[in-house]
Image (cartoon, rainbow, N blue to C red):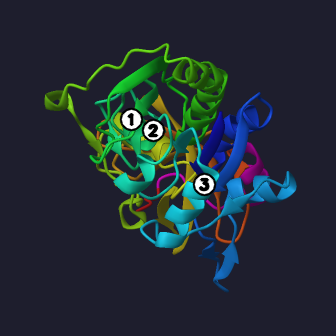
Amino acid sequence: MKIVYAATPEISISCLEKLFNSSHEVSLILTMPDKPSGRGKKLIPGPIKKYCIENSLPFIQPENLNNFDLENKLKEIAPDLLVVFAYGKIIPKKIFELPTHGSINIHTSILPSYRGAAPIQRAIINGEKSSGITFMKLSEGLDEGPILEYFEMAIEDDDTAGTLADKMSKVSSNNIIQTIDNIELNNYKITEQDHSKASYADKLLKKESCIEWNNKAMDIKNMINGYSPNPCAYTIYKKERINVYRAKLSSTKSEGAGKIMEFSRNKLLIGAEDFSVELLELSRPGKRKISIGDFYNGSKDFFNPGKYIT
């Protein structure tokens, strides 16, 4: 089949690789326009665009999906199927109805739970024990289309949004070709979602990424891991913004919310409302992410036990 693939971030590369190396033809890739980044606001291409350039794959970066140029280009290609995986924009009906077999979306939750922009992150933040991948037909509503297939997976206690995304990338790529083959052969059944059970995963906001140490330790641990690697949770100490990438729950009772209870080569322990949280990976402003052991080796006098962070 002739496939048009719409995707932007790292998680969707493995599916594109499988499609590229399959019997199907990847006729065109849609990916989001380059985004300004850093102090100089330099335009940075997304992971899918980089992959397309490296592998000489045809791609476009439309600013507006409602323009006639895109519609006409797709009509010229006459695709059999549009596959969407974390593209970044809602696909208009006039576009997703163009392909012969319609359009499918790969969503990183078991629908109807966690519809929306940040299902992986919100599942970890909310302390869920499982999630998964859903292959669904596109519809006009937000992640409301009928389900083709779904694949469940456990969320481990030490998972971050980044590690869970890696697992979901692998599961989706392991199943995408079979799903598309079934569509081509009309060998599939669809299941309508139970909309009464829907929940939503709103986009994470940078302004909400400051750690509130007066919360329960489990909630703080989940928040830190859910915000990793982006937009990344942080705390303030000695007037510095300290990014926190990974944490785990400690059984040690808190001596006060935000109190530095221990800082050693092996451990950084911070008090929460009830128990304490062990921070595992940090970065200081302008520095790369490092383990607590490496942080201690380079700055062993930075965190002062008995003092408080905010």
Q: Nearer the viewer, residue 112 or 225?
A: 112
> Mark 1 or mark 2, which has the lower sequence index?
2
Q: Which circle marks residue 8 in the picture?
A: 3
Contact flag, marks 1 and 3 (Cβ < 8 Å): no
Residue placed at 39% from the left, 43% from the top?
A: 220
Kindly identify which residue carries mark 1.
123
SS at circle 2: loop
Q: Residue furthest left?
A: 196
Give, as a three-letter code, the residue at label 1. Ala
Residue placed at 66% from the left, 22% from the top?
A: 174
Q: Is residue 125 left or right of residue 225?
A: left
Q: Quadrant of residue 130?
A: top left
SS at circle 1: helix
Please provide percent x and percent y for residue 291: 71, 45
* Magenta highlight on residue 295: yes
Kindly identify which residue carries mark 2.
102
Question: What are the residue bounds of the magenta stretch?
Answer: 293-306
Please provide percent x and percent y for residue 231: 51, 58
